[in-house]
């Protein structure tokens, strides 16, 4: 029996488990662990894991693949605890939204016989916890992959195939570039959302103001409902990039303030340009201004068969196969 260990059975970890169970992997046991026993119990009840294990060390014993789906601030401590107990040749991956710091921890703490492949699924919900988990959470999402320098081709292939089973698209990116990119498009929005909530709810007029707050306010403040611990850890492990983008945003706010105060035609032109820029992004969200990362060669079934048997290899290969156009020209698998 091959073993996959999922450490952290919140939204992401439980969703990964649900997606893997839906793939009906043969001779694979999925073990779940969470520091919150009720989260682990819920993941088991949902069918995301075969069993739960309260002891972190026992969770990783005999596991060929270990997935860390925990706030980034918890990763270093987990590495320190499990490192001496990881099986030789084990593959470790994570789902944290900052990568450079995590790779430094992996290099420092994990044994040379263990292969670390950093990961970050560009998917989620503002509601944390296993109750919000969904096997479809990663469908068609970009899944960033940042292999460590010690990661073998077999390890990278395994994680690529895992991403395929989740229904996501692997995207290879440098750790520093990743952190800069997500600081702008993922982490800055958290700051903006939270700052708007702070500015409005701390106003003496908030009680009256709240009566007229509708969809626009709800949409823009959605990210403020995210896990506070996770958001704090994101900011602290990607501090420089986030501060740089906060400074850029502040300058944009100053520019908009000046345009509003000026009251001329430039303000309308500015809104027109940003409207058009967003429409272009919506039409082609993954291709505007960025090239897809290279696929790692050699994603043969034998790689996955080595760890998890032929069923996982075949299923992952099918998930990664490009869609074929049908007789009407539509793409289908």
Image (tube, rainbow, N blue to C red):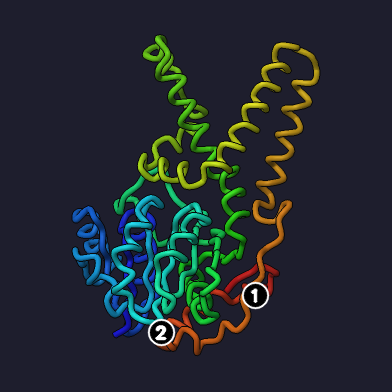
Residue 54 sits in quarter? bottom left
Q: Is residue 44 left or right of residue 137?
A: left
Of the two numbered discs 2 and 1 on the same chain, state the one appearing first in sequence.
Answer: 2
Instruction: Give coordinates of residue 109: x percent, y percent.
Output: 40, 65
Who's the residue at 72% across and 27% down the image? 271
The reply to whether residue 268 is visible in this rendering is yes
Look at the numbered disc 2 and give the secondary structure of its residue.
helix
Residue 260 sits in quarter? top right
Q: Give the label, 2 or 1, closer to the camera.
A: 2
Quadrant in which the C terminus appears: bottom right
Q: Residues within 10 Å of mark 2 (few under 14, many from 20)?
A: many
> In this rendering, is residue 56 above or below 185?
below
Residue 149 sits in quarter? bottom right
Q: Is residue 93 left or right of residue 252?
A: left
Q: Please name the residue that numbered disc 2 is placed on.
A: 307
Instruction: Give coordinates of residue 151: x percent, y percent.
Output: 51, 75
In this rendered view, identify the residue nearer to me: 2 or 282: 2
Q: Residues within 10 Å of mark 1 (few under 14, many from 20)?
A: few
Numbered badge on residue 247: none
Q: Is residue 281 left or right of residue 87?
A: right
Numbered badge on residue 324: 1
The reply to whether residue 138 is visible in this rendering is no
Look at the numbered disc 1 and give the secondary structure of its residue.
strand
């Amino acid at each position: 029996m091959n073993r996959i260990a999922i450490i952290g059975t919140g939204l992401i970890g439980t969703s990964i488990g649900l997606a893997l169970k839906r793939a009906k992997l043969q001779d694979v046991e999925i073990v779940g662990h969470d520091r919150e026993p009720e989260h682990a119990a819920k993941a088991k009840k949902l069918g995301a894991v075969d069993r739960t294990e309260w002891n972190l060390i026992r969770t990783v014993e005999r596991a060929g693949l270990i997935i860390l789906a925990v706030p980034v601030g918890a990763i270093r401590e987990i590495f320190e605890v499990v490192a001496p107990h990881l099986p030789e040749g084990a593959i470790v991956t994570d789902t944290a939204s900052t990568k450079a710091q995590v790779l430094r921890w992996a290099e420092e703490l994990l044994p040379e016989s263990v292969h670390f492949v950093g990961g970050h699924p560009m998917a989620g919900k503002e509601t944390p916890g296993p109750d919000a988990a969904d096997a479809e959470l990663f469908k068609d999402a970009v899944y960033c992959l940042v292999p460590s320098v010690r990661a073998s081709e077999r390890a990278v292939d395994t994680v690529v195939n895992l991403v395929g089973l989740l229904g996501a698209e692997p995207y290879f990116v440098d750790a520093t570039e990743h952190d800069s990119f997500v600081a702008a498009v993922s982490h800055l929005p958290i700051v903006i959302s939270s700052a708007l909530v702070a500015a409005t709810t701390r106003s003496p007029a908030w009680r009256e103001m709240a009566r007229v707050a509708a969809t626009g306010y709800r949409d823009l403040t959605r990210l403020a409902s995210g896990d506070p611990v996770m958001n704090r850890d994101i900011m602290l492990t990607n501090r420089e990039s986030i501060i740089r983008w906060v400074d850029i945003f502040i300058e944009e706010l100053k520019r908009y303030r000046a345009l509003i105060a000026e009251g001329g035609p430039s303000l309308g032109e500015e809104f027109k340009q940003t409207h058009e820029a967003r429409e272009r992004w919506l039409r082609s969200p993954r291709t505007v201004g960025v090239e897809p990362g290279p696929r790692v060669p050699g994603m043969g079934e034998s790689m996955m068969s080595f760890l998890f048997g032929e069923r996982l290899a075949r299923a992952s290969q099918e998930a990664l196969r490009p869609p074929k156009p049908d007789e009407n020209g539509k793409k289908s698998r």
